[in-house]
Amino acid sequence: CSRPLHVSSAASLSSSKTEPQRSSSTDDRRAREEEEAEDAEYIPKKKAKNPMVKIGYAWMIGLPTGIISFILAKREVDKNRLKQLKIRQRMQSSNEGDYEGSRYRRHTEVNLDQ
């Protein structure tokens, strides 16, 4: 814990008088320890989790699912459209051509005679 202490100037003068001078080898050792402390890096013990992995999984699942569901829905719509087109063509082909006029004229003649 290298927290600076608040000491009066008188106390610092008296302590410097009583303390012996430090040797240069002690200063060198302390300087090396400080350099090692600065160079020390945090080494994690287990691998960190990437938060983008969940988003990646969502894209991996969501994109193909969306494309497949779109294709299936389109096929279903095309099938229904084809059914309706065939029904319309049958209706048009049944309406084309000559009708037996006598069948319809009988009803109109009967109605007029009455």
Image (cartoon, rainbow, N blue to C red):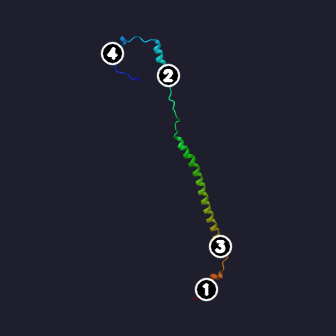
Q: Is residue 34 left or right of residue 12?
A: right
Q: CA gap, disc 3 to disc 2? A: 97 Å
Going from the N terminus, do you reach mark 4 or mark 2 first?
Answer: 4
> Amino acid type of disc 4?
Ala
Report the front residue among 104 and 76: 76
Q: Which mark is residue 68?
A: none
The residue pinned by badge 4 equals 11
Report the front residue among 14 and 71: 14
The residue pinned by badge 1 equals 109
Q: Are marks 3 and 1 in contact (CB under 8 Å)?
A: no
Give the x, y percent position of residue 32: 49, 18
> Residue at coordinates 59% horizontally, 51% vertically from top-left?
67
Disc nearest the viewer among 3 and 2 = 2
Q: CA gap, disc 3 to disc 4? A: 118 Å
Give the x, y percent position of residue 12: 35, 15
Going from the N terminus, do you reach mark 3 or mark 1 first?
Answer: 3
Disc nearest the viewer among 3 and 1 = 3
> Amino acid type of disc 2?
Glu
Give the x, y percent position of residue 86: 64, 66
The residue pinned by badge 3 equals 94
Q: Is residue 98 left or right of residue 7?
A: right
